[in-house]
Amino acid sequence: MEDLSADDGGALGAATRLIHHPYRAPDGFDAVPVPVHKASTVFFPTVAAMRTRQW
């Protein structure tokens, strides 16, 4: 995995720095990170169309 430490000289974009915290666990300790979920806004022409949508 790429090193995301704070001393990268600002090479990473703001979005990357917000999602990927620079903290690294001590050697010998590993954990599965929580996944990042992203979503989009969904538009419907009417409220009736939204309510009848089968998700």
Image (cartoon, rainbow, N blue to C red):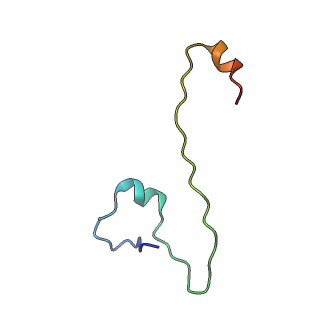
Task: Kindly identify the residue that appears in the image at 40 percent across and 73 percent down.
Answer: 5
In the rendered view, does 14 fall on the left or right side of 31?
left
Task: Tell me: residue 48, above or below residue 1.
Answer: above
- Residue 38 lies, in percent from the top left, at 54, 46
Task: Tell me: residue 4, above or below residue 55.
Answer: below
Task: Kindly identify the residue that appears in the image at 51 percent across and 76 percent down.
Answer: 24
Which residue is more in the foreground, 18 or 43? 43
Which residue is more in the foreground, 44 or 19? 44
Task: Tell me: residue 13, above or below residue 31.
Answer: above
Q: Quadrant of residue 3?
A: bottom left
Task: Kindly identify the residue that appears in the image at 32 percent across and 71 percent down.
Answer: 8
- Residue 54 lies, in percent from the top left, at 71, 26
Q: Quadrant of residue 31?
A: bottom right
In the rendered view, does 13 fall on the left or right side of 37?
left
Q: Quadrant of the C terminus?
A: top right
Q: How many marks?
A: 0
Task: Kindly identify the residue that appears in the image at 29 percent across and 65 percent down.
Answer: 11
- Residue 39 lies, in percent from the top left, at 55, 41
In the rendered view, does 6 fall on the left or right side of 43?
left
| Residue found at the far front of this picture | 54
Task: Tell me: residue 4, above or below residue 46.
Answer: below
